[in-house]
Image (cartoon, helix red, strand yellow):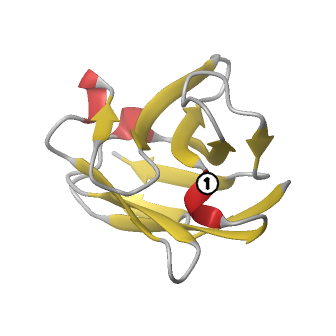
Amino acid sequence: QVQLVESGGGLVQAGGSLRLSCAASGRTFSDYVMTWFRQAPGKGREFVEHINKSGKNTGYADSVKGRFTISRDNAENTVNLQMNSLKFEDTAVYYCAADVFSYQNPRYWGHGTQVTVSS
């Protein structure tokens, strides 16, 4: 089992940047595929970006291509999401998630961190 705590959310102007972090505790962090999701007001949860266990492979949604970058530090048990060129439509609660097998339906979730982009 793993516990996840997100941080780094806040209010930023359109075009600005934020860096989200997710700290993991519990089972060996490198056992998990890590993923960021987001949920905007009135919408369903949306996949943002994932990273494999070693950190060598990532995948992202088209909506964040070229703007967001996921990374992980297995020594520090953290996964980060660098968000640049933020848009109003990036406003959402961002969740960190972990699963041993896949990014598509993670078993473990953090509580989320709010990102608000003002236009």
Quadrant holding the C terminus: top left
Q: For residue 8, say whether it is visible.
A: no
Q: Is residue 107 left or right of residue 106?
A: right
Quadrant holding the N terminus: bottom right
* Residue that protrudes farthest toward the left in the picture: 66
Residue depicted at x 54% and y 31%: 103
* Residue that protrudes farthest toward the bottom in the picture: 76
Q: Nearer the viewer, residue 61 or 28?
A: 28
Percent from the top left, x then y, of residue 65? 19, 35
Image height of 32 relative to 91, above or below: below
Q: Nearer the viewer, residue 58 or 66?
A: 58
Quadrant of residue 71 in the image? bottom left
Image height of 74 relative to 61, above or below: below
Residue depicted at x 42% and y 45%: 52
Mark 1 surroundings: few (<14), some (14-19) or many (≥20) residues within 10 A: some
Q: Is residue 99 left or right of residue 62?
A: right
Q: Amino acid at mark 1?
A: Asp
Q: How many marks?
A: 1
Q: Nearer the viewer, residue 114 or 99?
A: 99
Residue depicted at x 40% and y 68%: 19
Q: Is residue 100 left or right of residue 48?
A: right
Q: Nearer the viewer, residue 54 or 44?
A: 54
Q: Is residue 51 left or right of residue 17?
A: right
Residue depicted at x 26% and y 62%: 16
Where disc 1 sits, the SS reads: helix
Mark 1, residue position: 31
Percent from the top left, x then y, of residue 67? 20, 47
Q: For residue 45, say whether it is visible.
A: yes
Percent from the top left, x then y, of residue 27? 78, 64
Percent from the top left, x then y, of residue 8? 54, 71
Quadrant of residue 109 in the image? top right
